[in-house]
Amino acid sequence: MDILGDKLFHDLNYYDLFTQMWLKHNHIFHKSELHQLMPNVSQRTAIKYVQIAIDHGLLIEHTDPEDLRSKRITMSSGLKRKIERFLDYSISVFEAFPAPDPDQAT
């Protein structure tokens, strides 16, 4: 939660959205499909969440060059850095655990 900062984004629906966007390799989405990445809210609510993330600079909106009526959404470089920092921290926490003792295996 510290990494995203603003308490507005301390919501599991944002974590769903950002995680699913991160896991997709190209990180580029049609705005109309992002609600699918937030399965626990309605499409209308998901659209509001996405717009708030755009307004706060976590997501970037671009006109689709293939269809000028459509919008494409990408993660901001700042959001990508925050996710990478979170992943680095998570890995370091797990690496700090001692290796299991093979003599105590069950």
Image (cartoon, rainbow, N blue to C red):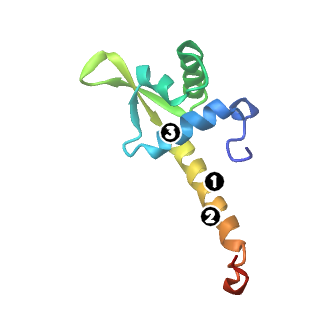
Is 9 positioned to the left or the right of 30 in the image?
Answer: right
Q: Distance between the residues labelled 2 and 1?
A: 9 Å
- Residue 24 at x, y percent in the picture: 42, 43
Instruction: Quadrant for residue 100, please give it.
Output: bottom right
Is 94 positioned to the left or the right of 66 in the image?
Answer: right
Residue tagged by mark 3? Answer: 20
Residue tagged by mark 1? Answer: 86
Instruction: Quadrant for residue 85, please give it.
Output: bottom right
Q: How far apart are marks 2 and 3 (CA)?
A: 19 Å
Q: Which tag is nearer the camera, tag 3 or tag 1?
A: 3
Secondary element type, mark 3: helix
Mark 2 belongs to which amino acid?
Answer: Ile
- Residue 73 at x, y percent in the picture: 43, 29
Secondary element type, mark 2: helix
**For the C terminus, which image quadrant?**
bottom right
Mark 3 belongs to which amino acid?
Answer: Gln
Residue tagged by mark 2? Answer: 91
Q: Is there CB contact under 8 Å for labels 3 and 1?
A: no
